[in-house]
Image: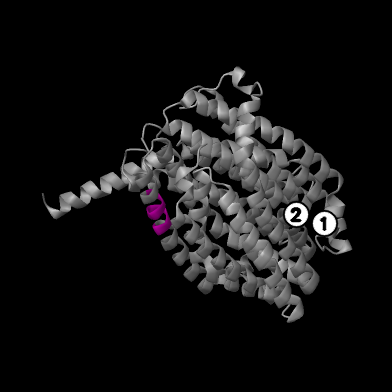
Amino acid sequence: MTETTLEKNLFSRIFTTLKQAIKGDESFDYTSGSIKKGVILLAIPMVLEMLMESVFALVDLYFVGHLEQSSYAIQAVGLTESVITIVYSLAIGISMAATAVVARRIGEKDPVAAAKAGMQAIIIAFVINTIISIFGFIYAKDILLFMGASVEAVEYGVNFTRIMMGGSLCIMLLFLINGIFRGAGNAAIAMKSLWLANICNIILCPILINGLGPIPAFGLMGAAMATTIGRSIGVLYQLYHLFNGRGTLKIIPAYFIPDLEQIKALLKIAAPGVLQFVIASCSWIFLAQLVATTGGDHGSAGYQTALRIMMFFILPAWGLSNAAATLVGQNLGAKKIERAEKSVFTTAKYNVIFMAIITVITLIFSRSLISFFTNDLIIQKIAVEALQTMCLGYVFYGIGMVLINTFNGAGDTWTPTMINFFGFWLFQIPLAYLLSKYYKMGPTGVFMAIPIAETAITLASIVLYKRGKWKHIKV
């Protein structure tokens, strides 16, 4: 066979695999097929899915960053997003439990039990988020004040916060239902739902913020309206594919009858998973407050701008690492432990390469990236410093994400919970406080604490992964 023929065959295989990944291929068996192909089939749509999730924040940031009172607007958006990370934490925790159980049942070749577990997770999400939405809408002003926003910023951004908190159910469902699809091995539907949601958000943002024809200019509030509407449309798309009966999961109305035993089993996995991400998000909330109180409105706006750009790069890496959760869950369900381990190594290798490239891009182009989102020179200076400091830990973030998803995909949600507790609350927060206040480094101290703590968390995760407790968890 000639070299040209070999190249054509290789190109053909790559193209076919990419096409399968984007289109969605539920016929592929993740417990027996090629591990590299399995990672690619899962990772590509998951990376694109998380890329789209990060675009939500960047689209808002771009448009509000060009409003007349941009420092207030950016601060309100950033601080609200920091608080909403609690909703993300709940959503990720519950979706993580759903992914672990659905993946395990699919690996055991029991799609009926997988479908039942997914629907019980949706019931849990509805109950929890109803409480959060009401509380967030009523106490929006108090939340912003608690986060360290100035009185002027609070008055300017309170309606943005009310809409975002009041519409948080769509955030919860978007994450949860995507977790169900990922557990079943159909990451493409999850990706497409966020693409649709983002397209709607991108179209609606300039219209609702600046006005168009008979539609008035809602300003900052328009950004919240566009995001909530976009996410809601994404959820409707998910529900259509969940109930159309064409996928691996066949849903019938009886699955929505509360099953206390199943709910208990899900909560047993989800509770430490939720706690794990609440611990992390509360740490980010504390850091945001610390920057706001030591750096003022411009310091807070600069940090929030850098954070949104960092998350734009981090979330795709998280999407890639999600492949480990599905592969580990399904292979443990099929009693193939060695194959689960190989899946972790392959996913981690790809994530390290991705994050190394992103580190170089961030260091070289940070100023250009920041200037695109804000015209304020003071905000730009602080944001560049923050972004260049935080990106130094990207490679360690990449490894840590894969290991955390490995534990969670296996149903071992307590291990990463304890890692986060010690890493964030007993190390990162005290370190940030010490550097910013005791050593009077201000926001710079907070920026430094982030990559230092993330590196320590990754090293601890490696040690616990090698101990192998995750291989023997029953779900």
- In which quadrant of the rendered view does residue 235 lie? top right
In front: 296, or 328?
Answer: 328
Q: Which mark is residue 144?
A: 1
Which amino acid is tagged 1?
Leu
Does 347 lie within the magenta span? yes
Q: Residue at x 80, y 70 (%)?
A: 293
In front: 292, or 157?
Answer: 292
Which amino acid is tagged 2?
Thr
Label 2: which residue?
A: 80
Does 209 lie within the magenta span? no
Q: Furthest-left residue in view? A: 1
Q: Does the residue at mark 2 contact the one at mark 1 (Cβ under 8 Å)?
A: yes
Which percent across, then down, holds residue 339? 35, 45
Taken as a whole, is the magenta stretch helix, strand or loop?
helix
Q: Residue at x 70, y 33 (%)?
A: 126
Which percent across, then down, holds residue 229? 69, 39
Q: In the image, which residues are magenta?
A: 343-349
